[in-house]
Amino acid sequence: MPRLAGAVLALALIAGAGSAQADTLVDNIRGETIGADGTLQTFTALLFDDSGVIRAVYRPGDSVPRQGRKGYQYHIDGKGHVLLPGLIDAHVHIVKTGFALLTLDLSDTNSLDEALAKIAAYARAHPDRPWITGRGWNQERWQLGRFPTAAELDRAVPDRPVWLVRVDGHAGWANSAALNLAKVTAATPTPDGGVIERLAGGAPAGVLVDRATALVANAVPAPNPRDIDLALMTAERGFARAGITAVADMGTTLNDWLAFRRAGDANRLYVRIMSYAMGTEAMAAICGSGPTPWLYTDRLRMGGVKLYMDGALGSRGAWLKAPYTDQPDSRGTPLLTETQLGNLMSRAAMDGYQVAVHALGDKAGATVLTTITDLTHTYTGDRRWRIEHAQVVDPADWPLVAGIAAHGGVVASMQPVHQPSDRTMAEARLGPARLAGAYAWASLKRQGAVLAFGSDSPVERPDPWAGIAAALTRQDASGAPEGGWQPQERVDRVTALAGYTSAAAYAGFAEARFGRIAPGLRADFVLVDTDPMTATPDAIRHTKVWQTWVGGGKTWDADHPDGEVAAVVKRP
């Protein structure tokens, strides 16, 4: 795999920040950005200095400086492309994204037999690996009607342990060798907040859900620092290719953080990371008594904590108010009590951390909203409480969103690409009565929530262009369903672009640093062949990213897709 850093420098930045000779003009562009007032603004050129900060933005009719001693030194011809702010993915798992690209990927399999064949081929191609690991399987896509079993996985790999994470990250599939090594038997008690799928006699069937996954996952050899560094570099390259210049890493572990710091220390951090710790223990271990400062010229900051209220719809771990339509004996799995949630949120809020809570089901959402409402009386000011996913929010609870929006602010961190992927599964899980609150982007915005859009990568590909298309249409790539699914929840083009730029930066308290094209902000931008304000949704979905720039340095160039592109980063 090509390294991200190396031979082709994007920009020859020289010493002497602020000198005119070090400035770079980008022109011959059709520029678009979200303004500070939330409206669309257009421009024809921008100027940034050698520290990667925008100095000026030129509107149609403005006088543009000339090249030379009293003007600018470097020039970038945009060749008529559309220039947008660098895209921001408001919810990813960076290291997991990298490992997903480096290990077995089952996300493209359409049947159990196809998956088993791919697993067997992968095992044959890697005879030296003591464990076969990967992710991406989805029994719904396979139309299996049930979870796969260890016995079926044994047919593909009988001689080594196998552990494969479900597409949503909330369940895992083990073969018999893995279950034996992990000592998961009929006598193993089911952990609180988890499910062990069992055979008629009580023996583990092969799939473990939510907190039960740790029973096997903890037996898998942990990756070493070099493995994690490679995963980070691999993920960064994928982000750059998609035009992504910043991400919110939702669930940063201590080992993840150390990898981010190693990359920053070595001047190899090519994406801006708004980091949210994996729970309060990691938060305290990494940060101590409060959020970190911005590091590496605004490349990295841990400002918040990620908590989990429930699991996922696909594995029936999302916590619902009423039973699942397709499994009437279950309402899902709460991972915390309301008291535990309140204590953890308070522990973070008292030290100034932003709190982000994973809540998919309507009961989980109601619990989180009620808890936040209670906490706003103690923790005042600009808090920007984040609800991650918010896939099913009972319309009866929408007034709670409005109340929080008026007292501390609320961010609905949602993933438009989930809606077309989940549509038929959600209908089966929820039934028609609950669909009014499902993936309700427009309704939550009307209640005052700020919409920050992302992918949940590696659950979905980190593709903001597919996300924008889905946000506009509520349709998949084939155009189904006609007219859009629950079309009243579509958003307009400015909202969709803001969700992946200015609003995503705001969601991470970064709006004064990046997310828009404006003087004083970082020169993070993309040059693309499609105008998201005028193009058809299908054209947006097929957008070609010509170049990606972070802080005045090029991180992706479609004319050199297999070459090495280095972003120049000023050391703090």
Image: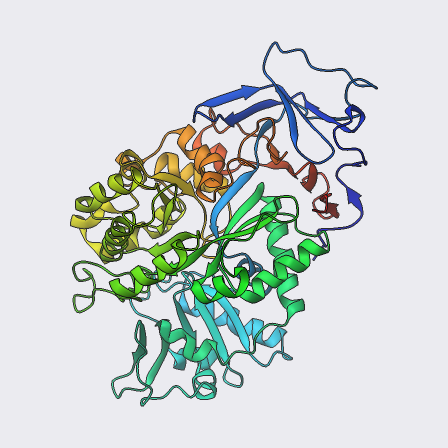
Is residue 486 depicted above or below 249 in this figure?
A: above
Colour scheme of the rendered structure: rainbow
Residue 192 horizontal side relative to residue 30, left or right: left
The x, y position of residue 247, in whole percent, is 53, 47
- Name the foreground residue: 464 vs 382: 382
Is residue 144 depicted above or below 410 in this figure?
A: below
Q: Residue at x 58, y 66 (%)?
A: 255
Q: Residue 548 sits in which quadrant?
A: top right
Q: Residue at x 56, y 44 (%)?
A: 246
Q: Is residue 108 visible?
A: no
The x, y position of residue 263, in whole percent, is 67, 56
- Name the foreground residue: 479 vs 493: 493
The x, y position of residue 248, in whole percent, is 50, 49
The N terminus, quarter of image = bottom right
Is residue 289 depicted above or below 563 in this figure?
A: below
The x, y position of residue 161, in whole percent, is 51, 82
Farthest residue, direction right: 69
Q: Residue 71 sits in which quadrant?
A: top right
Is residue 410 depicted above or below 358 in this figure?
A: above
Q: Residue at x 27, y 86 (%)?
A: 202
- Name the foreground residue: 37 vs 158: 37
Q: Is residue 367 visible?
A: yes
